[in-house]
Amino acid sequence: MKILAVNRIGNKLYVDDNGVKYAECRTCKEVGRGYLKPIADFVEAKQNILGVLYDCNECRKGEKKRWRKENPEKTRAYNRSQERIKKNREHRKKWEEKNKEKVKKMKITRLNRETAASDTIPIKEKTKTLKQYSYSCALTGTENNLQADHIIPLVTGHASNFFENILILKRDLNVSKNGRNIFDWAVQEHEHLGFTLTRFNEVMTEVALRSGMTLEEYKEYVNWCFDNQIDISG
């Protein structure tokens, strides 16, 4: 197997000849039992270099059971707080169902406030793009923490602030893409960020049609914009 990454405590991420990934479990390693396990046996953690938490699900389950046994009062308090959270979510969901227009306006307001490009993209262009994707992230379908992204970054000198060049993305996707070529970014990051290339191609086909292009023509145009950037700093 090939080593793909090593975290700060020395645990490794591997891939076998069939493309299956495995990670080392910290606790299993410490107690001397079989510690190399498929990444499906771990909780995903995108912020970690291995892409998963240090301990496998079995070890985490055992640790939780031990902690609950040793901390009955804290466990009861936690359970009560989870019940409150569940009730609040149910209440909010019912409210949103009864107030769909208010929810749409709230999302537009939040987008205008939070998007990194809020001072350059006109509100009507953001609103038009939000409607295009049913008030959700174009690639993941997530309805919260949305931002407006310049598909072709302004820094290339070939971009606009209008509908043809705007995509609604979840905040972490927008931060990850930043000034990168969207086609290169999607190939490199789609698994890590939770969207499929099939969905990406569907969205980009729609984006290409906005400018009267096919997907391949639009991809060539985007590549040209990056290869022929104009200095706009002055």
Image (spheres, helix red, strand yellow):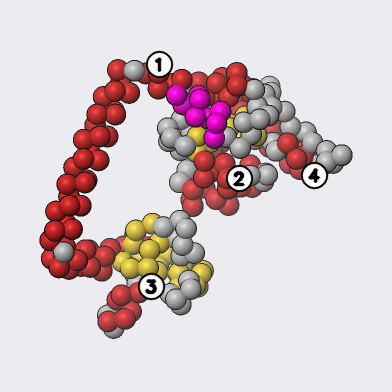
Residue 223 percent location from the top left of the image:
73, 41
Name the mark on residue 227. Answer: 4
- Give the structural element (helix, strand or loop) at label 4: helix
Residue 70 percent location from the top left of the image:
15, 68
Residue linked to disc 1? 101
Q: What residue is drawn where x is 48% and y is 71%?
A: 7
- Give the structural element (helix, strand or loop) at label 1: helix
Residue 66 percent location from the top left of the image:
17, 68
Residue linked to disc 3? 24
Q: Compared with residue 31, is residue 210 higher up or lower down, i.e. above or below?
A: above
Q: Earlier in the sequence, mark 1 or mark 2?
A: 1
Cα separation, mark 3 vs mark 1, equals 49 Å
Q: Earlier in the sequence, mark 3 or mark 1?
A: 3
Cα separation, mark 2 vs mark 3, equals 30 Å
Q: Earlier in the sequence, mark 1 or mark 4?
A: 1
Q: What residue is drawn where x is 73% and y is 36%?
A: 154
Q: Is residue 69 visible?
A: yes
* Residue 153 lies in the magenta stretch: no
Between 150 and 101, the one lying in front of the other is 101
The magenta stretch is 106-114
Amino acid type of disc 3?
Glu
Amino acid type of disc 4?
Asp
Name the mark on residue 177. Answer: 2
